[in-house]
Image (tube, rainbow, N blue to C red):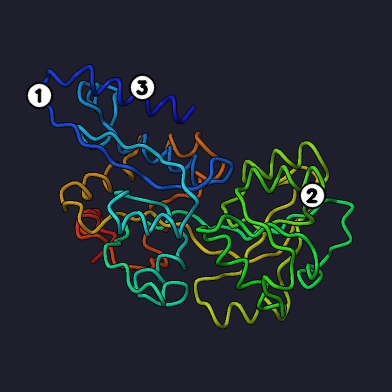
Amino acid sequence: MLAAAALLLVGAALAQVSLGQETRYLRIGTAATGGTYYPIGGLIAGAISNPPGSRPCDKGGSCGVPGLIAVAQSTQGSVQNVEMIARGQLEAALSQSDIAFWAHSGTGVFQTRGRITELRSVANLYPEHIHLVVRWDSQITRVSELRGKRVSLGELSSGTLVDAKIILRAYGLDERDLDAVYGSPDQASDQLRAGTIDAFFLIAGSPVAAIAELARQRDIRLIPIDGPESDKVLEQFKFFSRATIKAETYSGVEETPTLAVSAQFLVSAKLSDDLVYGITRALWHVSTRTLFDGGHPKGASIRLETALDGLAIPLHPGAERWYKEAGRIK
C-alpha cells in the first residue's frame, strides 16, 4: 500500500511538470517491511510530500513541502541507513538513538569506521522496545538460556544486531555461544513458526507487524530483559531506558519488562536549511497528527512535546529554526 502511494505521488508529479513548479525527491531509509520503521517512514513521507499540482493545504490538500516527493525506502536498518546518508544514497532516515550517536561521534560500533559527520537530527519519534521472541512451548525463559540455541540476531547492518550483542554480553554470552543466524523480521518470524530457530531478537516500536502476525498464527512468549543484567546495560549505555511491552500488545502475550532505545528522524547535513525547515514544519502540521494517529499504532507516540527529548546528534539548522519559532527552543 505504501509503495502504491509512492507511485501515485510520483505519477502526480510527472503529470504536472508543465506547471513549472520545481520537483524535488527525498529518499527516507527505513528497515525491513515487516518492522515498524517502514510503515512509519511511509507516514512521514506522506506528511512532508506535496507534489506539483496538488491541492493547496488550506483547501484540503497536502500540507507538505511544495514540490517535494518523499518516498520510504526499505533497508537493512539503522546502521545501513546512516552509512547510506554518508554516501549520498539517502537524504533522510530513521535510526536508533544509540546508532546515531555512535555514527556521529565515531565511537562504539563506528570506532573503526570513524565519524559520519553528515548526520543531523530533525526529531525524536518514539521508544523502540527490545523484543526477544520464543515459541510458547520453548524451554527458554531467560536470556542466559540462549547458549547453544539457534537464534536470529537481525540483519547484518541493523541496529537490532548491535543491541542484541549488547544484551547478550550483559548476560555473559556472545555470538560464538549461539548458533547465530541473520535475517529480516519476516524471515525470523517464518523460521520461528517453522521451528528452524529457537528465538529471535527485534528492536522496534511495538506492535511490530511481523511479531503480531506470528502471534495470530502460533502461541509465542516474550523473554523478559530485567534484573541485574539490565542494570549493567543501563549503567554503561545511557541511551537505554526501562520499558514494558503491555499485555496483549501481541495476542496471548503477557506484560513483559524490557529495555528500549528511541527512534529518531535524521537528515543529511547537506540538505538546505529552507528544505529542512519546511520538512520540520510539515512533520508537525496539525493535519499530520491525524495521519500519525490513524496510520499506525505507534504513530500516536510521535508527539511534538517529546520531539527534542534525548536527541543523539545536533539538530539540523533548518529544524532548529522551526523549533525556535514554535517556542520549543529558547
Q: Under tag 3, what secondary structure? A: helix
The amino acid beneath tag 1 is: Gly
Residue 122, percent from left and from top: 32, 56
Image check: 6 left or right of 18?
Answer: right
> Would residue 324 be seen by someone viewing this image from the given angle?
no
Regarding mark 2 in the picture, which secondary structure is present there? loop
Residue 37 position, x and y percent, is: 49, 47
The picture quadrant where one finds residue 172 is: bottom right
Q: Foreground residue, 56 or 275?
A: 275
Q: In the image, is residue 268 above or below residue 39? A: below
**Badge nearest the viewer, 2 or 1:** 2
Point out the image quarter for the C terminus. bottom left
Residue denoted by label 2:
196
Does label 3 or label 1 sit earlier along the sequence? 3
Q: Is residue 319 left or right of residue 186?
A: left
What number is the disc on residue 8? Answer: 3
| Crowding near the residue tagged with mark 2, few <14, some 14–19, many ≥20 C-alpha atoms within 10 Å | few
Q: Separation of disc 2 and disc 1 at Cα?
A: 56 Å
Type of amino acid under label 3: Leu
Query: Which callout, 3 or 2, points to the residue nearer the camera?
Result: 2
Residue at 74% from the left image edge and 55% from the top image edge: 133
Q: CA distance from mark 3 to mark 1?
A: 19 Å
Provide residue 108's location: percent of width, then percent of height. Answer: 46, 76
Q: Are marks 3 and 1 in contact (CB under 8 Å)?
A: no
Badge 2 or badge 1: first in the primary sequence: 1
Q: Secondary structure at mark 1?
A: loop
Question: If you read the primary sequence from the N terminus, does the residue marked by circle 3 or circle 2 appear first?
Answer: 3
Amino acid tagged 2: Thr
Which residue position is annotated with label 1? Answer: 20
71 or 114, which is in the foreground? 114
Is residue 287 or residue 62 the one in the foreground?
62
